[in-house]
Image (cartoon, rainbow, N blue to C red):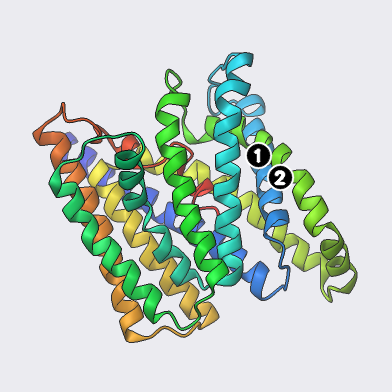
């Protein structure tokens, strides 16, 4: 009886963890798109900087003030030698995501982001000369095919937004690969990752944002018809972006690797559906088919990696746990685009 109740609670906990993760993720994406499109705040560097500042403050409060998470101590030398390079890539990744969201619909951007598994495998194979089982390569075919079909049939195609999303995939892959060596020896969770990287990212981005977008932001402030409400939405998106990192930490510890993979791909489908209901961007039938093929391909890719890790535990580059199925700096803030 006790085992049955424990099993039921585990299932309920996993469902609640996934739902709150979806909720934060979709809300942040929709709010960012709303900021760019409806509020006419067309400054992705400034939005990214606000998110980094909010995340820095949030991580400090969680670790130092509320003490909800223990601080992982990092040597001062390693902060500059290891954390700073990761923060630079982390910053580029988030900025590119926001730039792409500025120019292309959420559905297209999310589909392009699903190309990340392919770019990760290709980069590891080309640059780091790593071996991959043929089944890994085969699982990438529907992802690549779905991306191509979606790109060709996208009715709101924008080259700048497309390139930003594509290079964002490369940045995510580079961040994931370099994390294996640069962060070796440190078992970071999502909160400690934000605690160390967000301040560096703020420092890196603050000056470019001020120089490139400062005058535009000031003009927007003077001409915005409902300034207070708009600022609440902009800064609120930063607060929710940090909350998303906390939700990712919770869902990782409440689900299995397979569940996490499937939920992650369904999350994209939920985000695409919600964005279409709100913004009503035109989507053709073939475009929707391409998006569906890509998501199915990502799910199949995750299944293949999980299967190989159980069949041959010693196989190089196959994930041994669900933590290896996601970037160390997570969606979020990877999802926090």
Question: What whole-number distance in Å separates the C-alpha atoms at marks 2 and 1?
Answer: 6 Å
Mark 1 residue crowding within 10 angstroms, few (<14) / some (14–19) / many (20+): many
Q: Are marks 2 and 1 in contact (CB under 8 Å)?
A: yes
Quarter of the picture containing the N terminus is top left
Query: Is residue 94 in view from this perspective?
Result: yes
Q: Which residue is mark 2?
A: 205
Q: Which residue is mark 1?
A: 201
Vertical order, 310 against 301 (above or below): above
Where residue 262 appears, as percent x and y from the top left, is 27, 54
Where residue 258 appears, as percent x and y from the top left, is 23, 46
Vertical order, 73 against 103 (above or below): above
Q: Secondary structure at mark 2?
A: helix
Where residue 213 appears, as percent x and y from the top left, is 79, 59
Vertical order, 163 against 61 (above or below): below
Query: Is residue 1 in view from this perspective?
Result: no
Left or right: 174 as drawn, with respect to 322:
right
Q: Residue at x 14, y 42 (%)?
A: 307
**In the image shown, does 221 or 240 lie closer to the viewer?**
221
Left or right: 124 as drawn, with respect to 235:
left
Where residue 124 appears, as percent x and y from the top left, is 33, 39
Residue reaching furthest left?
311
Q: Residue at x 47, y 39 (%)?
A: 175
Mark 2 residue crowding within 10 angstroms, few (<14) / some (14–19) / many (20+): many
């Amino acid at each position: 009886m006790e085992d049955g109740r424990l099993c039921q609670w585990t299932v309920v906990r996993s469902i609640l963890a996934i739902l709150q993760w979806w909720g934060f993720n979709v809300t942040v994406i929709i709010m960012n798109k709303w900021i760019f499109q409806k509020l006419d705040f067309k400054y992705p560097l400034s939005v990214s900087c606000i998110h980094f500042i909010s995340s820095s403050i949030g991580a400090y409060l969680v670790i130092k003030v509320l003490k909800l998470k223990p601080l992982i101590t990092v040597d001062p030398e390693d902060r500059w030698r290891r954390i700073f390079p990761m923060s630079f890539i982390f910053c580029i990744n988030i900025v590119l995501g926001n730039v792409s969201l500025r120019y292309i619909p959420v559905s297209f951007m999310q589909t392009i982001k699903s190309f990340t598994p392919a770019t990760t495998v290709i980069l590891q194979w080309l640059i780091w000369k790593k071996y991959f089982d043929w089944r890994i390569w085969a699982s990438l075919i529907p992802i690549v095919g779905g991306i191509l079909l979606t790109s060709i049939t996208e009715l709101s195609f924008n080259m700048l937004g497309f390139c930003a999303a594509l290079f964002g995939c490369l940045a995510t892959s580079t961040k994931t690969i370099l994390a294996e060596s640069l962060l070796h020896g440190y078992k970071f969770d999502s909160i400690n990752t934000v605690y160390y990287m967000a301040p560096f990212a703020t420092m890196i981005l603050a000056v470019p944002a001020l120089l490139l977008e400062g005058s535009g932001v000031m003009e927007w402030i003077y001409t915005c018809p409902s300034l207070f409400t708009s600022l609440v939405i902009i800064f609120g998106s930063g607060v929710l972006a940090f909350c998303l990192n906390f939700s990712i930490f919770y869902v990782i510890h409440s689900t299995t690797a397979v569940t996490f993979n499937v939920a992650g791909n369904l999350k994209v489908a939920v985000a695409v559906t919600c964005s279409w209901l709100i913004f009503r961007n035109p989507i053709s039938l073939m475009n929707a088919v391409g998006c569906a093929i890509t998501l199915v391909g990502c799910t199949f890719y995750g299944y293949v990696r999980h299967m190989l890790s159980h069949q041959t535990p010693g196989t190089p580059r196959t994930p041994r746990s669900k933590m290896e199925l996601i970037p160390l700096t997570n969606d979020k803030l990877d999802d926090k685009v």
